Image: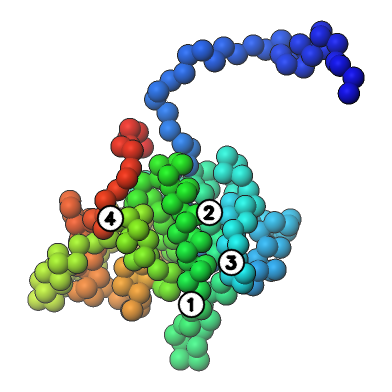
């Protein structure tokens, strides 16, 4: 290889305008731009999912990772430093438009199909696929120091139109790994008995859903669809914490779970966290 003349080399290094940046002072007050981790299922097989997530279309979408099922493999489709288009118009805990601040994991799974009786059938995730998702989640969380309460499902951040990763995604397993917090079971049992005596009204449920992280249901344009809006949030909440029944009905057990999720000490990490303290308030 021919040596570049020294003057040309210097120009390449400094840029044509001679821009020089001094990196000798670095701030300690910074963190990752990645605040959230969002779980999805693809509603398709591997081939169709890969095509949808990588090729141009009239409604282009993508994700940082795609986890196939047979064989199980983790594909990186978008670098973590770049924005992938997976979250849509979304909201969680005061943050909106989560594409800008999240990493998205798409899990190959055909999702839910409607039964003639109006119910849904969901396709189970093979255990090896879940192992891969857990390992990937641990790796991402450790590198970006994502807070446990910021690992969410697409259905939670966009409940009006999405259900993924659905009721068969094992959130409890992530809790057992210490990745997400879980409502204290003794407290939930105690609160459930209390709410069986008297069920709170819909406004209470709406307030608690908002406190937990869902988009507050107070915009004027939502008034007409307020009931459907709340029902969809309840379905998303139930799919995560009470997957045996996700009918969107505000019942005593759902009230108890919501109460536990929103009171100090009601949500617990089941495994001691090996976490660096969070220094940012945001
Ligand atoms: Zn999704």
Q: Which residue is identified by label 4?
A: 271
Badges 3 and 1: C-beta atoms under 8 Å apart?
no
Q: Which residue is identified by label 1?
A: 124
Q: Is mark 2 within 8 Å of ligand 1?
A: yes
Residue drawn at point x = 63 percent, y = 48 percent:
78
Q: Report crowding for label 1: few under 14, some 14 to 19, many 20 or more residues within 10 A (C-alpha).
A: some
Q: Which residue is identified by label 3?
A: 72
Residue drawn at point x = 57 percent, y = 75 percent:
110
Q: Secondary structure at mark 4?
A: loop
Q: Is residue 206 left or right of residue 158?
A: left
Q: Secondary structure at mark 1?
A: loop
Residue drawn at point x = 51 percent, y = 69 percent:
128
Residue 126: in sight, yes or no?
Answer: yes
Count how many numbered circles sit on residues in the image.
4
Which quadrant is the C terminus positioned in? top left
* Spatial CA span between label 3 and label 1: 14 Å
Going from the N terminus, do you reach mark 1 or mark 4 first?
A: 1
Going from the N terminus, do you reach mark 4 or mark 2 first?
A: 2
Residue drawn at point x = 64 percent, y = 52 percent:
77
**In the image, farthest residue toward the bottom:** 116
Residue 104's mark?
Answer: 2
Q: Nearer the viewer, mark 2 or mark 1?
A: 1
* Spatial CA span between label 1 and label 4: 25 Å
């Amino acid at each position: 290889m021919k040596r570049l003349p020294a003057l040309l080399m210097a120009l390449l290094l400094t840029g044509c305008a001679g821009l020089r940046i001094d990196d000798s002072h670095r701030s300690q007050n910074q963190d990752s731009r990645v605040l959230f981790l969002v779980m999805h299922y693809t509603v398709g097989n591997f081939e169709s999912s890969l095509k949808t997530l990588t090729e141009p279309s009239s409604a282009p979408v993508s994700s940082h990772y795609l986890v196939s099922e047979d064989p199980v493999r983790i594909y990186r489709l978008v670098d973590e430093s770049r924005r992938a288009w997976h979250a849509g118009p979304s909201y969680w805990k005061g943050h909106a438009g989560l594409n800008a601040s999240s990493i998205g994991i798409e899990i190959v799974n055909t999702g839910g199909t409607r039964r003639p009786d109006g119910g849904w059938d969901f396709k189970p995730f093979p255990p090896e696929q879940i192992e891969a998702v857990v390992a990937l989640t641990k790796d991402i969380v450790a590198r970006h120091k994502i807070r446990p309460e910021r690992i969410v499902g697409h259905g939670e951040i966009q409940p009006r139109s999405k259900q993924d990763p659905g009721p068969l995604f094992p959130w409890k397993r992530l809790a057992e790994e210490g990745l997400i917090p879980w409502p204290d079971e003794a407290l939930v049992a105690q609160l459930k008995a209390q709410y069986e005596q008297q069920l709170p009204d819909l406004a209470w449920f709406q307030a608690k859903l908002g406190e937990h992280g869902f988009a507050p249901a107070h915009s004027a344009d939502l008034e007409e669809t307020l009931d459907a809006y709340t029902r969809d949030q309840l379905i998303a909440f139930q799919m995560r914490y009470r997957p045996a029944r996700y009918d969107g009905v505000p019942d005593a057990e759902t009230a108890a779970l919501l109460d536990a999720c929103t009171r100090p000490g009601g949500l617990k990490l089941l495994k001691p966290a090996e976490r660096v303290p969070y220094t940012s308030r945001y």
